[in-house]
Amino acid sequence: MQNHAKQDDDVISFLPENYPNMGLSHSLSHLTKKYNTIHMLPIEEQSQYADAICRKVVKNQSYEIIRRNLKHETKSPMFHHWNVTAVGNLAYICLHSNDEKIKQASKALLLKYKSWRKREWWTDLLIKIIIIIIIIIFVYKM
């Protein structure tokens, strides 16, 4: 079995030469704009945000790399660190992996992420409402 450093070198070698946007599927500004809505898109649209490395890993069936990442994320997902490309990669794996265990683990993790984002949205909204109420009370007392 390869060590992690060797596996990481293998992943980097997957990046096609002259791939636009450093292997990303879209420009950084476009990806930033999509962050607030990526969790609401159908899985097919989410998968369009997968990067070149993920696409090549799945195409080459280099599943050890995916298993290692899924194992870490399944134990303690750090959703607040995820970006549009991370969601796109997971969606792409769900749709295109030939390994059924990886496909199911990816789908379960993607559903957890969607649920987390919905809770995060409601929490942000509630905080904004509370701030508005506090401002109104403060202004009213003056």
Image (cartoon, rainbow, N blue to C red):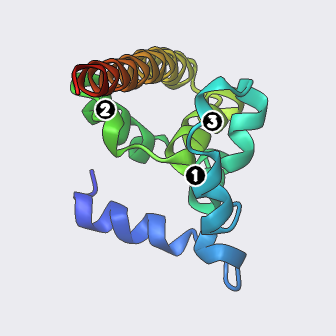
Say whether residue 50 is visible: no
In this rendering, which labeled residue sits more in front, label 1 or label 3?
Answer: 3
- Mark 3: amino acid: Ile
Q: Residues within 10 Å of mark 1 (few under 14, many from 20)?
A: many
The number of discs equals 3
Query: What residue appears at the point 51 percent right and 74 percent down from the top-left corner?
Result: 13
Q: What is the x, y in percent for residue 100?
A: 57, 18
The disc label shown at residue 54, or none: 1
Foreground residue among 1 and 7: 7
Residue under label 2:
73
Q: Residue at x 22, y 27 (%)?
A: 76
Q: Is residue 70 above or below residue 1?
A: above
Work out whether 124 lies above or below 6: above
Provide residue 21's location: percent of width, then percent of height: 65, 75
Q: Which mark is residue 20?
A: none
Q: Is residue 68 above or below residue 127?
A: below
- Asked which secondary structure carries label 2, the reply is helix
